[in-house]
Amino acid sequence: MSRLLTLHDPAEARAYYAAGLWRDETFYALLARHAAARPDAKALRDSARHLSWRELKDWVDAIADAFHEAGVRTGERVALWASNRAEVVAAFLACSRQGYVCNPSLHRNYTLEEICGLLGRTRAAAILVEDGWGADSDRHDAVATVAGLPGMRRVFRIPAVRQSGDLPAPGTRPRNLRGPDPNPDSVCYLAFTSGTTGRPKGVMHSGQHPAGELPGSREGLASRRIDCPPDPVAAQPSHRLGGGRAVAGRRHAARDRRSGAPVARASTG
């Protein structure tokens, strides 16, 4: 079974919709809407790329197509074990497009054995792995090891330098793209607790939860560029996504160097 069992209550959901707290758009739907409205405005930046909304959407579509061609299906899990970079945001949005559950909560300071344990618990169907990202990556072949896990259909390897590796590069055209999943109430984001006091626990979020925690935070996906600054500390992408900050644009301390206006960043620090 690929679907996750949750405590989602349809009656509560109707109340949230009626109160205006929830909306009928996924993260990908927001991306598509604003790529159509202002295609040439800058949307995403890391140390190597500066993409417009149209370029980001096209890249997300190509990555979604690659996930689908790898055999990942609606409701299945895609894990991200990588640093603070554009591929992480694009892969997250590709999962939203396809109705996959994205798990970016893989710490840099986890050993390969610990990562395999988390992947086994989520029954991940695909994973994005950055070279050298892991506590013992210098002693083990992470790609070969996770590729042998039960149910793992594809490992997308990316180099530590800012190149796309096994992922489609920006500008790649999809070959077999299906229609996007329209359901914002399904689980799209699976985070793990730190495990400080015990075994890490999985926390499931629908598309409504990360984006709906603050009024207007969903609109941030359109209103602010997403920055992925270089990050020397060992923080995992789920902390950089910040429960939706990177993709929902929640306002916090980061400010544009020129204008001084708040900007969304892929780091909560």
Image (cartoon, helix red, strand yellow):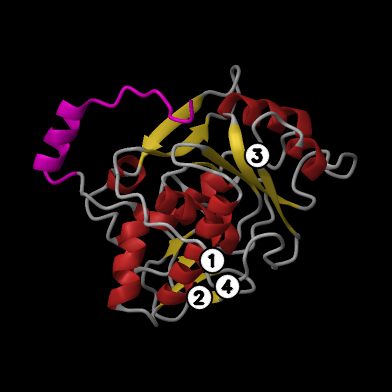
Three-letter residue code for mark 4: Thr
Q: Is residue 254 above or below residue 5?
A: below
Q: Which residue is mark 3?
A: 107
Q: Residue pushed farthest left?
A: 18
Q: Is residue 49 magenta?
A: no
> Circles 3 and 4: CB distance less than 8 Å?
no
247 with respect to 170 (left or right): left
Q: Which residue is mark 2?
A: 51
Q: Which residue is mark 1?
A: 175
Q: Residue 210 at what x, y percent from top left?
A: 36, 44
Q: Which residue is mark 4?
A: 172
Eye-nearest disc, 2 or 4: 4
The residue sitting at 30% across, 50% down in the picture is 182
Q: Which residues are magenta?
A: 1-21
Eye-nearest disc, 1 or 2: 1
Q: Residue 171 at what x, y percent from top left?
A: 56, 76
Q: Is residue 201 visible?
A: yes
Q: Residue 235 at what x, y percent from top left?
A: 62, 45
Eye-nearest disc, 4 or 1: 1
